[in-house]
Amino acid sequence: MAVSDTRLAQIAARFSEIEARLASGTLEGKDFVAASRDFSELEPVARAAAEVQAMRAELASLATIDDPEMRELAAEEIARIESELPEAEHRLALAMLPRDSADSRSAMLEIRAGTGGDEAALFAADLLRMYERYAAEQGWRIEVVSANASDIGGFKEVVAQINGNGVFAKLKFESGVHRVQRVPVTESGGRIHTSAATVAVLPEPDEVDVAIEDKDLKIDVYRASGAGGQHVNTTDSAVRITHLPTGTVVTCQDGRSQHKNKAQAMLVLRARLYEAQRDAAQGEEAAARKAMVGSGDRSERIRTYNFPQGRVTDHRINLTLHRLTEVLEGPGLGELIDALIAEDQAKRLAALGE
């Protein structure tokens, strides 16, 4: 998918315009935020376009050389540029792919134990630690918003907020069913069990993205239960919020104060409503996304972690890594995520006819 010289010039002009607006010092508030976002989104495209533009210009210049003594050197340089130009044009095509509007956002991570009882809850805790380590490597900040702990140290359900640039772009393909095959700590006979946990990654909306009216909310407070310290069962700090128009229910009981639990529950509610709005609005785009590396639906089995063989298999791209420990520690997860993103990009480029 070669980009025309006219289009390259348009990209350069648009980027220069945004740079000038930011440098003018006249932008404030929302205007400055919007211009900064436009700059960060267009910068990689402009950089790739400038590289292609420079290479094409140099080719055109070299082609005009008539000096017999310089012609041989020019021919060598032309051959070098012509061999490198397709890769530069490919990088530009990748940079120009339409982006998910939520890619730059922070995200809410929801992990729920599935089939497998206590073992599934322990696996949910393993997945949370895996994402915590990966987030640390990326320089993101992760905070548990709500957790429903199991009796033996795992999680029946845990929700975490991950703050940083481009969190959703990196983690959006993690949504789905994660399956584990191993000998549970509760198994005395040494038999391998298969358990599962579901993961959902939701982009975190701004308040303006989702309008929630007080009249649409039913808020219940009650006493927290389960592990959590001396405050549990002593005060009505737990909060359950029901969004009446959609029937969406969010609970939070981790914090010591009712006020904090309510604020955290609202964060989760806003993220779930925003994702529902996105799914409804995207329509055909959502169907196309499903044809890439998966829909991100939590009902879809996406990955198996096999402890006896020390391997992890992502079923969507048929990629197996025999480095289970590295994946659970974070670095190996990055390799899986990068492979998923590359596969998605390749399929979208093919759909555009490159």
Image (spheres, rainbow, N blue to C red):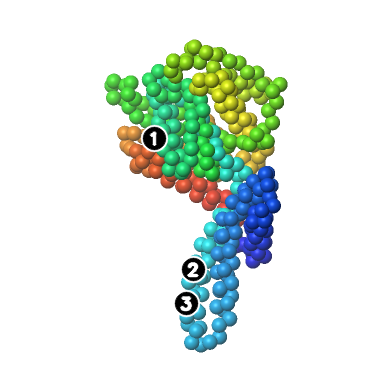
What residue lies at 36% left-to-right and 26% top-to-bottom? 193
On the image, the x and y values in percent for residue 334 come to 43, 44
On the image, the x and y values in percent for residue 278 come to 64, 37
Using the rendered image of the protein, determine whether residue 234 is visible from the camera's viewpoint.
Answer: yes
Q: Mark 1 belongs to which amino acid?
A: Tyr
The crowd level at tag 1 (other Cα within 10 Å; few <14, some 14-19, many 20+) is many
What residue lies at 42% left-to-right and 20% top-to-bottom? 150
Seen from the viewer's position, the closer of residues 267 and 49 is: 267
On the image, the x and y values in percent for residue 299 come to 52, 30
The crowd level at tag 3 (other Cα within 10 Å; few <14, some 14-19, many 20+) is few
Mark 2 → mark 3, Cα distance in angstroms? 11 Å
Quarter holding residue 23: bottom right
**Residue beneath label 3, please?**
76
- Mark carried by residue 83: 2
Q: Is residue 348 above or below residue 144?
A: below
Mark 1 → mark 2, Cα distance in angstroms? 41 Å
Using the rendered image of the protein, determine whether residue 351 is visible from the camera's viewpoint.
Answer: no
Seen from the viewer's position, the closer of residues 320 and 186 is: 186
Mark 3 → mark 1, Cα distance in angstroms? 51 Å
Q: Residue furthest top?
A: 234
**Residue beneath label 1, please?**
305
Is label 2 in a helix, a strand or a loop?
helix
Residue 284 shown left or right of residue 52 in the figure? right
Query: Reading the chain from its start, which is encountered first: label 3 or label 1?
Result: 3
Residue 2 shown left or right of residue 140 in the figure? right
Is label 1 in a helix, a strand or a loop?
strand
Is label 3 in a helix, a strand or a loop?
helix
Q: Residue furthest left?
A: 189
Query: Reading the chain from its start, which is encountered first: label 1 or label 2?
Result: 2
What residue lies at 43% left-to-right and 28% top-to-bottom? 124
